[in-house]
Each structure stands twice: as C-alpha cells, then as structure tokens.
Amino acid sequence: MSILYLLIPLAVGLMAVAIAFFLWTVRTGQYDDLEGPAHRILMDDDDPMIPGNVRPIKKAKKPVQSADANKAPDEQGDD
C-alpha cells in the first residue's frame, strides 16, 4: 500500500511531461500538414511530369586545352 504513495506522483509527473511535450509539438506546427510528406515522397523532383516544366539537358562542355597543348612538339620547350 505504501508503494502507491510513490507510484501515483510518478504517474502524474509522467503524464504532465507527456502533455507538455504534446502541447509543444502543437505550438511548433508539427501537425499542420499531415498529407504533404506522404505525397512528397511519391513525387520525383529530378524528372518533372509536366512537359512545360521540363528542364533542358545540358550538353557536356569540351575540355579547354592549354596554349602549350596546341604547339607543335618541336616548339614545346623548357621555358
């Protein structure tokens, strides 16, 4: 019977912490958009589905050659 004097305040304290945590999550907006993350995981941002929003594919640029690479082998020397 004496254990109830310990368990009841512990249970009330734990419940107070849980309620405080729940109120904090509501105030910070954790429950504002419940469907957005579920839909967002299905969308592929890299490949848009609407043809008007398709980004053009960039072509690879040719590597830039240095001035020494354009010289003839006999012109290349130790400067």
Image (cartoon, rainbow, N blue to C red):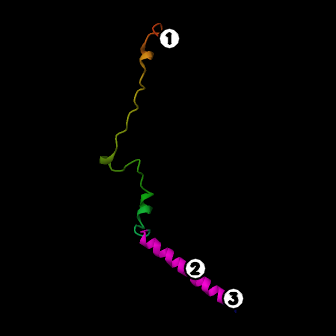
Residue type at the position of mark 3:
Ile
Which residue sits at x=36%, y=50%?
49
- Measure the alpha-carbon separation of dots 1 and 3: 92 Å
Disc nearer the start of the sequence (3/2): 3
- Measure the alpha-carbon separation of dots 2 and 1: 80 Å
Q: Is residue 23 above or below residue 33?
A: below
Q: Position of residue 4 (x, y in %)?
A: 66, 89
SS class of the residue under badge 1?
A: loop
SS class of the residue under badge 2?
A: helix
Q: Position of residue 67 (x, y in %)?
A: 41, 17
Q: Position of residue 79 (x, y in %)?
A: 47, 12
At label 1, counting other C-alpha atoms closer than 10 Å, the crowd grade (few under 14, some 14-19, many 20 or more) is: few
* In front of the other: 40 or 17: 17
Disc nearer the start of the sequence (1/3): 3
Mark 3, residue position: 3
Q: Which residues are magenta?
A: 5-29
Q: Position of residue 11 (x, y in %)?
A: 60, 83
Q: Is residue 24 above or below residue 63?
A: below
Q: Residue 28, located in which quarter of the rendered image?
A: bottom left
Q: Main secondary structure of the magenta part?
A: helix
Mark 1, residue position: 78
Disc nearer the start of the sequence (2/1): 2
At label 3, counting other C-alpha atoms closer than 10 Å, the crowd grade (few under 14, some 14-19, many 20 or more) is: few
Mark 2, residue position: 14
Which residue sits at x=42%, y=61%?
39
At label 2, counting other C-alpha atoms closer than 10 Å, the crowd grade (few under 14, some 14-19, many 20 or more) is: few
Residue type at the position of mark 2:
Leu
In the image, is residue 63 part of the stretch drawn in magenta?
no
SS class of the residue under badge 3?
A: loop
Q: Residue 55, located in which quarter of the rendered image?
A: top left
